[in-house]
Each structure stands twice: as structure tokens, then as C-alpha cells.
Image: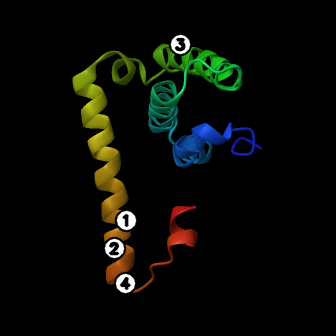
Amino acid sequence: RLIMSIPSNLAPISPYLRLYKELSKKEEVISYYCLMYAVEKAIKIDSKSKESVSFLTPKIDELENKKAQLSKGEENEVMNSNDVTMAYMENYINRLFDYADTKDRESKWDMYANFY
């Protein structure tokens, strides 16, 4: 449903919205930044057409709400400090890499099963 509603000219943001949706329950901070990147990229592509504005307005509202929600919880420091945000993201990427590396070394790598 999320991907289907994307205006065709904003199709390049589909992968980031897909990640946003997939990570929203298990990795909220990373999910937030996926949505933020998708919105920023979409605005660069087209911020003027009626179709794009209709699509982006709720996404921007969602970003604002999600940031407010995350800023109140344990993620407060991550959401309000660029240095902490970068460290958090780097840690997430390292965990993801380590997981993939372990599965690869065990010859148990199945991208779909392991990632999704």
C-alpha cells in the first residue's frame, strides 16, 4: 500500500520508503532517517506538482510526529545530537555487517530470510 501510492515521478524513493516500513517496528531511529532521506530526495525531485505535494505532506507530518515521539523516549539523545546519531547509525551498520558476515562464513546466507 505504501509503495503503490507513490507518484510515478517519485519512484526513486521507493526503496527508502520500503526500508522505513520494514524497520519501523524493530529499529525506529534508523526507520526515521530512512523516511527523512526519502522525503528530502522527493522534495529535490518534485516539490511543486499537486500529486507530489499531496503525497509528501502526510510524510512530512509523519516525520515531525515520529521525531517528537522518539525525542521523548530513550532515543532522545540520538535524535538531538548529530554526533550521537552518526555513532548510532555506524553501530547499526556494523551489527548488520557482522550478522551478514557470520551467516556468510557459516554458508547460511539467504538474503531474503536473513534481512526480511
Location of mark 2 (residue): 102
The residue shown at (60%, 38%) is 9
Instruction: Indicate left or right for 65 with 54 as reference.
Output: left
Contact (CB < 8 A) between labels 4 and 2? Answer: yes
Secondary element type, mark 4: loop
Secondary element type, mark 2: helix
The number of callouts visible is 4
Location of mark 1 (residue): 99
User: What amino acid is labelled 2 in the image?
Assistant: Thr
Mark 2 vs mark 3, CA separation in Å: 36 Å
Instruction: Indicate left or right for 54 with 40 as reference.
Output: right
Location of mark 3 (residue): 68
The answer to whether residue 10 is visible is yes
Q: Is residue 50 above or below residue 92?
A: above
Quadrant hosting residue 58: top right
The answer to whether residue 25 is visible is no
Can you give x and y, in whole percent of width and height, for residue 8 in the image?
66, 42
